[in-house]
Image (spheres, rainbow, N blue to C red):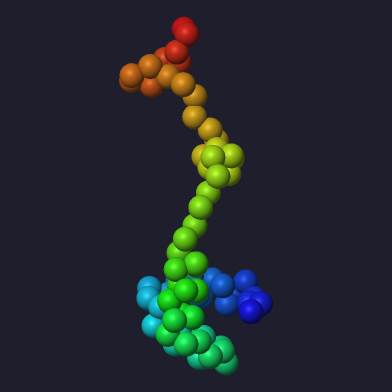
Amino acid sequence: MKLTEGQLEKARACKSAEELRSLAATEGLELTADEAEAYFAELNDVHVSDEELDAVSGGKDKCNDDCRVPYGR
């Protein structure tokens, strides 16, 4: 099933599989309870790689216990 970005945003905002199923119905899509559970689980199963996390956070320098002075200085 191909969804638009707007539909995906609405789906990600759902708090339960039943809410997702109701949203699908308003979009003209039929989901069984099992399908809604599977899609809900998939939407909420987000994995971020270390590289992606570093890119977002700007990385992390190694530092001493109080993180004011980097190691090696």
Query: At 42% across and 15% down in the image, what residue appears?
Result: 69
Image height check: is 48 above or below 22? Answer: above
Residue 10 located left or right of residue 33: right
Q: For this rendering, which residue is in front, 35 or 48?
A: 35
User: In this figure, what is the number of numbered marks?
Assistant: 0
Image height check: is 67 above or below 24? Answer: above
Q: In which quarter of the image is residue 40?
A: bottom left
Image height check: is 66 above or below 55? Answer: above
Query: At 38% across and 21% down in the image, what residue appears?
Result: 67
User: Could you tell me if residue 68 is visible in this image?
Assistant: no
Q: Where is residue 57 in the image (x, y as percent from the top left)?
A: 52, 39
Q: Position of residue 23 (x, y in %)?
A: 48, 85
Q: Position of residue 49 (x, y in %)?
A: 55, 45
Q: For this rendering, which residue is in front, 68 or 13?
A: 13
Q: For this rendering, which residue is in front, 57 or 23?
A: 23
Query: At 38% across and 16% down in the image, what residue appears?
Result: 64
Quadrant in which the N terminus is drawn: bottom right
Query: At 53% across and 90% down in the image, what residue appears?
Result: 30
